[in-house]
Image (spheres, grey):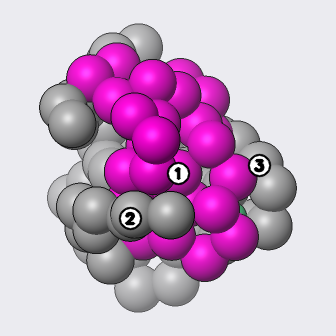
Amino acid sequence: MSRQVISATLAIEKGKIVCADCGRALVEAGQSWKRHAALTSTPIRDMPGAASAVDDKVVLRYFACPGCGSLLDTETALPEDPFLDDVVKA
Ligand SMILES: [Zn+2]
């Protein structure tokens, strides 16, 4: 089985983006994988050491593998912002 590593946490196998740790398929290559990950959001202001100048609405999003729980990516955003998509094509 051939695997193309596309980041430290993701790979492509058989035309699908998969978790690099457990191999669980998230989505067809070329589509947004974040919509298929397990999402957790935490307000930045609740994190240790958060700067007082950070807007109260800003969140840190954690995208994890729904199969093994490995952290795949993070991003900071306002709650209503769309995901910052990394679209990977085979
Ligand atoms: Zn996994």
* Cβ atoms under marks 1 and 3 closer than 8 Å: no
Quadrant containing the C terminus is: top left
Determine crowd level at label 2: few under 14, some 14-19, many 20+ residues with C-alpha closer than 10 A.
some
Q: As displayed, is residue 10 above or below residue 58?
A: below
Label 1 CB less than 8 angstroms from ligand 1: yes
Residue 52 visible in image: no
Residue 46 occupies quadrant = bottom right
Between disc 2 and disc 3, whose residue precedes? Answer: 2
Q: As displayed, is residue 70 above or below residue 86?
A: below
Left or right side of 89 for 58: right
Between disc 1 and disc 3, the foreground one is 1
Between disc 1 and disc 2, the foreground one is 2
Question: In which quadrant of this rendering is ligand 1 seen?
Answer: bottom right
Q: Position of residue 74 (x, y in %)?
A: 40, 58
Residue 7 occupies quadrant = bottom left
Q: Nearer the viewer, residue 81 or 64?
A: 64
Between disc 1 and disc 2, whose residue precedes? Answer: 2
Q: Nearer the viewer, residue 64 or 76?
A: 64
Q: Is residue 63 magenta?
A: no
**For numbered disc 1, what is the local secondary structure?**
strand
Q: Which residues are magenta?
A: 9-37
Residue position for label 1: 18
Q: Position of residue 11 (x, y in %)?
A: 38, 59
Label 2 CB less than 8 angstroms from ligand 1: no
Residue position for label 3: 66
Report how far apart the C-alphas of labels 1 and 3 lie in the structure.
11 Å
Q: Position of residue 71 (x, y in %)?
A: 57, 69
Report how far apart the C-alphas of labels 1 and 2 lie in the structure.
9 Å
Q: Residue at x 39, y 63 (%)?
A: 2
